[in-house]
Every structure is written in C-alpha cells, then in structure tokens.
Image (tube, rainbow, N blue to C red):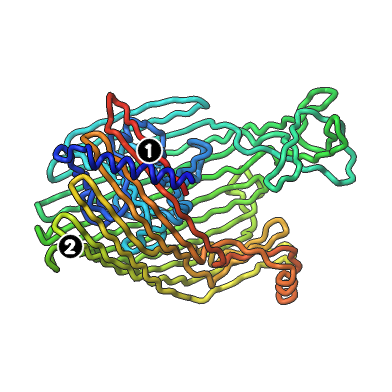
C-alpha cells in the first residue's frame, strides 16, 4: 500500500512538472563517471546515480565520510555506535555490506573491510553512488551498487584545518594542504580521531541451575529477555567502548602535456578500539558493596545467578591498512582514451578476547587493469572495453596468550587458515545513440575466471591433543555477467531509463578453508562453495524542475541465489560425521550455497539547491 501511494504521488508530481516547468532555463550538466566507467552527463546515465559534492561534505562536517551518504535514497548506513563502530556498513537494495556493494577510491577497489570510511574528509572531492547491478563493468561485489570516493585534485594553493570536540571525549583533528596548476597537483590530508565512547555491551546472566550455594542476596539487577525470548538478567556492562584512529592520504597528479596524465595515491590508516571500566550493577543487599564474581540469589526471588570477573571485560583490537595506487591515461583526442591502473593494498585485522585468544588476519591484494573508451568505431557509438587481473592472499592465525593484555605472550597456535584467490576478467560495453540526443542503448557484459589455490587449514583440537590439518585442491569457476540498459531523454531536463543485468560475489578464503571449533559446535569450511549470484531489473525517471529542484523515482527488483550461509547438520548427519572421523561433536554447521532471496522496492527523492546554507531534501525508500 505504501509503495503504491508513493509511486502514484510521484507520478502526479512529474505530470505537474511536465506542464509547468520552464525547460529553457534548466540544464542537467552534472557529469558522472561511475555508472559507465567514462564521463557521461548525469541525465544520460543508464542508472540511478546520487552525487554528494565537496560543498555538502564540508557543510555536514561529519567525523567520518560515510555520514555524508546517510540521507541518499536507497542507501542504508549502519553505524550503531557512532565513531566507536569499527564495522560500519553500507547496504543498497537489499544487498548487505561491503562484500556485496563495491567501494572504490578514485575508481580503484578499496581494501576489503570497513577502513574506507576512515579516509580524511578533506581529501574527498565528491562521492558518486550508482545503484543496481554493476558486475558487467566491475566484476565481483558490485551486486547492490557501487560507491566511488573521488579525491580532490587541487589547482591552486589550499589549506584547511579543522579542530572539533564533542561529548564523551570525542575529538577530531584534520588538516589538508595542497597546491597545483594545469600540469601538477598535490594534496596531503591527515586526520586523527578519538572518543572515550559509552557502554555498548550489556552483561546478561541466565538463571543458575548448579548446586553451588549462593554467597548472599544481591540487588541492582533488571529482568529482561534475550534474543530467543528467554528470561535473563541485566547485571552490568563491559565498560566504555573507546576508539581512536589516524589516517593519512597523499595524492600526486602530473599532466606533462595535453595527451598524458599520471596519478599516484598513497593511503595509510590505523585504528584501535577497546573497552574500559566494566561495571557490575549488582550490590550486596546487606552491605551495598559491588559484587563481580560468585553465585548470588536475586533479592525478592528464588533465582540464582553466577557471574565472573571476565564477564565485565571485552575485546580490544585494531586494523592497520596501507594502499598504493598508480594510474596512467593517454588521450586519443576525439577518438577516446586508454588507461592503465595498478593497485596494491594490505590489511591486518587483529583482536584479542578476554579468554586469552589472539587472532590476526593479514591480507594482501594486487590488481592490474587496462581500460579504454573508444568513440565512433561504429557511427554514433562509444565502446568501453578493458581487462583486469587480481590476486589476493590471506594467512590468518589464532593463538593462545599467557596474558590476554600482552599480544607478545602468544604460546600455542590454535588455528591457521591460508589461501589465494586469483581472478581475471574482460569486459565490454557498447553505447549506441539510436535517436540524436534522445535515445541511448547500452549493451555490455563481463567474463570472469575465478580461481582458488594453496588452500590450507590447521586447527588444534583439545579433545584429541593434536592438530587437524587439511590441504585443498585448486579449483576454478567461470562467470558471465551481462547487462542491458536504455535511456530516453524527451527533453533536456527529463530522463526515463530501464535496465536488466546480473551480478556475483565469489566466496572468501575464510569461507572456503577455515574450519574451527567453539563452545561445543564445529564450524566446517566448504572448499566447494561457488559464487553468489544476483539478477536485477529497474525502471526510473529523473527530472529537474526549474533551477532549484531535482526529483526522481526508481522501481527495482532483485533475485538472489546461492547465497552463502551456515547450515546446521541434522542429528543423523552429525552422527554420520562423528562415526566417519572418530569425533564426538554435538552440533555441526557448514557454509553452503543454500539460500535464495528477493528484494523489491521503490526509491523516491527530491532535492533543492542550497538556500541560505540550508539544503532541503525529501527521500523515501520502501524495500
């Protein structure tokens, strides 16, 4: 019902604007690059594209760059703990997280994970968000859409210094320094952020059924429910979730002549987080002194609870990230351009739990791409064609620590998972002008060959007092992702578009090779996992009304198959596994391509140009 009302309302809006807009005064001259991998007027792109400009980013003044996108239609950002959230996610059209929504930095895939949101805001010139399936151009992960963070290229001396402070000890220090002219440009940006945070993890105690006699009665608890609806008791928290990071970005741009251009990018980021001051809410009913360990009876009931000191502590960790990129472009004049891109990055996400477990997951990625945009090979056409090669390596380890506050006190290696993922892709997209300045047809596709090799998993099993080791065979798969789109511009301020296409995401090394045991449950890897696949369709309309207002609407549908999720073994399967391997596990889960899903919805949006420093907007997304 909501979707129907929303669509009807927007159709009425566009009908009115067709009658009353003064089209002679209006031009949609904004140029975007993400939707077609070449410069295109926004009104002529075959996708729903949102742009956040540098002025808006500066006005928002958000401590992290992802906050600049939170009001875009069809884009869902999850940052539930503010600056302390180490895993912020962006989701589009029912596809969750950066694993299924591709993040680019100047057209280069950002390091996997969540570090992209920590780029210095002053280094970002604009953000382009292209929604829909884009594996036909970009390959894996471009299922829900593509976010392209485009950095600033200064043409004159620039200096920006921002210092800010907020509640809970939040402080942000940012500086950006640059200079440039027609031939050379350089920008250095840096930001440091920290916050004392607030308690984010409650400590819940279940009713204790053991035979230990309670030490006494306690007060300060609160009865509540867990996620399964069971009665539990809130007895404390793990302390304030503190966070700090620093991020540095250097961009160099050199244009020796009118035909050639070289660009270099260097980015380093490192964050750390933890919890401090974990508090027990329980107090002795007689002395009112705080209690943090032991078995106690809840005053006014016959319920007993058991608490321990470690319950009021939580993990700490961090993630250093380094990225280097270089690109070369050569102009062919009116015939188009060719380019070469190389990018290398490394990340090491690590964390320590109070139980004394230290996990480190270093990852290395290398990518090389050649791309060209060629005009008039066929009259009134433009061809985008390219190829790329990628290799990623992971070697994750988990140790037992003698002292959980000292990472150097590692004693036994409990788990090691490593492997390589290699992919090669070739893509092409033909843009045909069927009616002069009226109708465009986009036909494209991409062929990807995806290979996994050197898979290895080693895990220490306490029950058997030995390592369980597995080596996995090399395997490969081939995926083709087609896409077709059409754009009709009845006038210079209106765009009608439709598209259909497919997308995919290959499984990660951890999905394929990592088996591990935790709290009586065995989590099995699955070296036979295949890629997730998506099939998408959309229709939309975009119209500019006068010099101030832009309104747009999109209807979309996505069907997903072979989604990767853990499947629980039946009792018969658990029994068969134990008999075959001589084990005694009670519960077993394994990742499999078992899930299918669909999403459909409508995106509505209207934006006014800034008036007196205020940017009015209205968005509605129904999925």
Image point (64%, 53%), residue name: 400
Crowding around mark 2 (Cα neighbors within 10 Å: few <14, some 14 to 19, many 20+) is few
| In-front residue for pair 243/469 | 243
Q: Position of residue 333 (x, y in %)?
A: 9, 58
Mark 1: secondary structure: helix
Q: Nearer the viewer, mark 1 or mark 2?
A: 2
How packed is label 1: few (under 14 Cα within 10 Å), some, or many (20 or more)? many
Q: Is residue 353 left or right of residue 553?
A: right
Residue behind mark 2: 434
Which disc, if any, is residue 68?
1
The number of discs equals 2
Position of residue 488 relative to residue 154, above or below, is: below
Q: Nearer the viewer, residue 525 or 549?
A: 549
Residue 527 visible in the shown view: yes
Could you say which is closer to the camera, residue 27 or residue 78? 27
Which image quadrant for residue 29?
top left
Q: Relative to 138, is 400 on the left or the right?
A: right
Tell me what residue is drawn at x 50 percent, y 26 percent: 169
| In contact (CB < 8 Å): disc 1 and disc 2 | no
Q: CA distance from mark 1 to mark 2?
A: 37 Å
Residue 40 on image: x %, y %: 21, 52
The mark found on residue 137 in the picture is none
Residue drawn at x 50%, y 46% as measured from the top left? 87
Of pointers 1 and 2, the one earlier in the residue sequence: 1
Res 110 seen here: no
Q: In the shown orientation, is residue 403 left or right of residue 473?
A: right
Q: Nearer the viewer, residue 443 or 605?
A: 605
Q: Secondary structure at mark 2?
A: strand
Asked if residue 275 lies left or right of residue 572, the reply is left
Give residue 36's position: percent from left, percent from top. 26, 57
């Amino acid at each position: 019902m909501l979707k129907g009302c929303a669509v009807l309302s927007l159709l009425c809006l566009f009908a009115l604007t067709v009658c009353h807009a003064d089209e002679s005064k209006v031009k949609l001259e904004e140029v975007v690059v993400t939707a077609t991998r070449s410069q295109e007027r926004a009104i002529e792109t075959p996708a729903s594209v949102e742009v956040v400009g540098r002025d808006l980013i500066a006005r928002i003044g958000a401590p992290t760059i992802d906050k600049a996108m939170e009001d875009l239609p069809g884009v869902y950002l999850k940052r539930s703990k503010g600056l302390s959230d180490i895993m912020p996610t962006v989701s589009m059209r029912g596809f969750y997280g950066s694993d299924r929504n591709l993040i680019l930095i100047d057209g280069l895939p950002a390091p996997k994970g969540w570090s992209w949101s920590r780029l210095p805001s002053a280094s970002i010139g604009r953000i382009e968000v292209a929604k829909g399936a884009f594996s036909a151009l970009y390959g894996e992960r471009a299922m829900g859409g593509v976010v392209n963070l485009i950095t600033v290229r200064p043409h004159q001396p620039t200096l920006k210094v921002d210092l800010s402070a907020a509640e809970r000890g939040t402080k942000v220090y940012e500086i950006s320094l640059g200079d440039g002219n027609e031939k050379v440009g350089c920008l250095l940006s840096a930001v440091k952020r920290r916050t004392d945070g607030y308690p984010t993890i409650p400590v819940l105690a279940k009713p204790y059924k053991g035979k230990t006699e309670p030490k006494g009665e306690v007060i300060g608890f609160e009865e509540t429910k867990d996620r399964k609806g069971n009665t539990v008791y809130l007895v404390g928290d793990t302390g304030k979730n503190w966070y700090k990071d620093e991020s540095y970005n250097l961009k160099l741009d050199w244009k020796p002549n009118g035909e050639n251009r070289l660009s270099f990018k260097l980015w380093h980021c490192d964050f750390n987080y933890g919890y401090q001051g974990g508090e027990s809410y329980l107090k002795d009913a007689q002395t009112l002194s705080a209690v943090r360990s032991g078995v106690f009876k809840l005053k006014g009931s016959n319920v007993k609870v058991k608490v321990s000191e470690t319950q009021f502590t939580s993990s700490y960790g961090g993630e250093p990230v380094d990225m280097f990129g270089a690109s070369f472009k050569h102009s062919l004049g009116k015939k188009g351009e060719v380019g070469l891109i190389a990018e290398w990055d490394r990340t090491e996400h690590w964390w320590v739990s109070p139980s004394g477990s230290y996990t480190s997951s270093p990852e290395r990625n290398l990518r090389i791409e050649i791309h060209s945009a060629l005009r008039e090979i066929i009259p009134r056409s433009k061809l985008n064609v390219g190829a790329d090669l990628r290799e990623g390596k992971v070697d994750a380890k988990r140790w037992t620590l003698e002292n959980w506050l000292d990472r150097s006190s590692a004693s036994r290696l409990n788990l090691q998972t490593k492997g390589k993922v290699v992919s090669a892709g070739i893509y092409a997209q033909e843009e045909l002008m069927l009616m002069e300045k009226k109708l465009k047809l986009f036909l494209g596709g991409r062929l990807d060959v995806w290979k996994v090799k050197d898979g290895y998993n080693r895990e220490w099993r306490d029950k058997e007092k030995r390592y369980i080791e597995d080596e996995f065979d090399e395997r490969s798969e081939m995926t083709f992702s087609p896409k077709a789109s059409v754009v009709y511009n009845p006038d210079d301020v209106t765009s009608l578009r439709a598209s259909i296409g497919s997308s995919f995401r290959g499984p990660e090394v951890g999905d394929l090779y990592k088996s591990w045991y935790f709290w009586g449950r065995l989590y099995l890897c699955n070296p036979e996992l295949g890629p997730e696949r998506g099939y998408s369709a959309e229709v939309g309309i975009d119209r500019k009304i006068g010099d101030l207002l832009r309104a747009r609407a999109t209807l979309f549908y996505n069907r997903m198959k072979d989604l990767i999720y853990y499947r629980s073994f039946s009792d018969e399967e658990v029994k068969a596994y134990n008999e075959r391997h001589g084990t005694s596990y009670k519960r077993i889960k394994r990742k499999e391509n078992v899930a299918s899903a669909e999403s459909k919805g409508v995106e509505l949006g209207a934006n006014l140009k800034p008036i007196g420093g205020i940017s009015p907007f209205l968005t509605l997304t129904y999925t």
